[in-house]
């Protein structure tokens, strides 16, 4: 059993002290151009360093999207390693958005890359896909428990295509998405103040009262800002589980760069709006 403070406990503390905001680090080509940066490794490094320096001492969570770094090969991954290290050193938690999913030794290798403290990519949590069966995630679940890390499992995503899988109804009458939520509730049973095994649930999905979102774990909620959802929408979408919601904002904050003061002001405003909405 790990003696490291579990991710759920650390996340709860960060959300309570810094506000429940997750800022995505999504250095796609259009955003680099908007910042006046070239679409190359130097631009990637400048972008990532600016975001971390501006916000790592104030936001609860960063969510770097691994694909935007991997597209530059080994040099891009090196920038990702430094971004993760710098963010965590400044006190922010890092959720690696890599959406890994496979079986057996391959899933174990993915888990080792992001959830083993000896890895240069070690993050506080990792997004994973359960659509080879929830049981396929077991190597990641086990390593997360040992290392004090967490997982965010894709359950009810905001993209329209997701519904054809996530809302499909099983033979027992329960949807696939609801099944994933039930698995996570079982993982988090008895944990306090919050479990370490969360779900990804889109903030743009409207009324989700037919799903039991009270999994005693965090709910990573993309969709605030550019995708159309607002902080005020959160209570209606998440109901009694709203206190455990970690809303993710990417473009809504990042569009204000490279001006550091503007980045800080935008993140601060989102954090306050979200804090007010979930505590009302």
Image (spheres, rainbow, N blue to C red):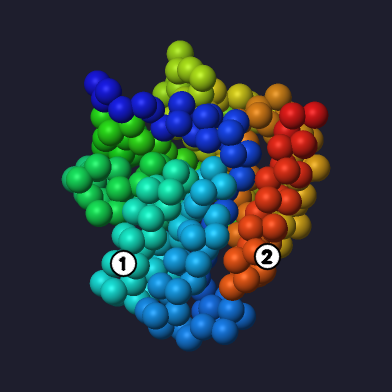
Q: Which mark is residue 77?
A: 1
Dot 1 crowding, Cα within 10 Å, few <14, some 14–19, many 20+: many
Q: From the image, which quarter does the N terminus lie in? A: top left
Q: Is residue 158 left or right of residue 91?
A: right
Residue 72 point in image, percent of width and height: 35, 76
Q: Secondary structure at mark 2?
A: helix
State whether residue 13 is above or below residue 201: above
Sequence order check: which comes first, mark 2 or mark 1?
1
Which label number is shown at residue 188? Answer: none
Question: Looking at the image, is 88 positioned above or below residue 64?
Answer: above
The answer to which quarter of the image holds residue 139 is top left
The residue under the point 22% across, 50% down is 119
Q: Is residue 212 left or right of residue 148?
A: right
Tell me where residue 23 sits by quadrant. Answer: bottom right
Q: Residue at x 33, y 72 (%)?
A: 76
CB within 8 Å, label 2 to label 1: no
Mark 2–mark 1 Cα distance, whole angstroms, equals: 27 Å
* Number of numbered discs: 2
Crowd around label 2: few <14 · some 14–19 · many ≥20 (10 Å): some
Q: Position of residue 170 (x, y in %)?
A: 53, 34
Mark 2 sits on what residue?
A: 262
């Amino acid at each position: 059993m790990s003696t490291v403070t579990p991710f759920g406990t650390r996340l709860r503390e960060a959300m309570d002290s810094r506000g429940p905001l997750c800022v995505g680090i999504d250095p796609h080509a259009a955003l680099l151009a908007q910042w006046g940066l070239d679409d190359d490794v130097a631009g990637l490094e400048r972008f990532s360093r600016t975001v971390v320096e501006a916000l790592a001492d104030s936001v609860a969570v960063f969510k770097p999207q691994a694909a935007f770094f991997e597209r530059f090969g080994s040099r891009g991954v090196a920038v990702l390693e430094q971004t993760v290290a710098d963010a965590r050193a400044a006190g922010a938690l890092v959720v690696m958005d890599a959406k890994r999913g496979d079986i057996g030794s391959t899933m174990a290798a993915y888990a080792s890359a992001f959830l083993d403290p000896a890895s240069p990519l070690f993050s506080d949590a990792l997004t994973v896909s359960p659509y080879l069966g929830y049981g396929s995630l077991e190597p990641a679940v086990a390593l997360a428990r040992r290392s004090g890390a967490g997982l965010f499992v894709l359950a009810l995503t905001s993209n329209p295509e997701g519904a054809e899988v996530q809302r499909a109804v099983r033979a027992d009458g329960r949807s696939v998405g609801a099944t994933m939520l039930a698995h996570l509730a079982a993982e988090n049973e008895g944990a306090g103040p919050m479990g370490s095994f969360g779900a990804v649930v889109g903030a743009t999905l409207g009324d989700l009262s037919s799903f039991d979102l009270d999994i005693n774990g965090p709910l990573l909620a993309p969709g605030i800002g550019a995708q159309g959802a607002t902080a005020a929408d959160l209570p209606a979408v998440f109901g009694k589980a709203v206190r455990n919601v970690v809303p993710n904002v990417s473009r809504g904050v990042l569009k204000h760069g490279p001006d550091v003061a503007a980045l800080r002001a935008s993140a601060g405003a989102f954090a306050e709006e979200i804090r007010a909405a979930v505590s009302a």
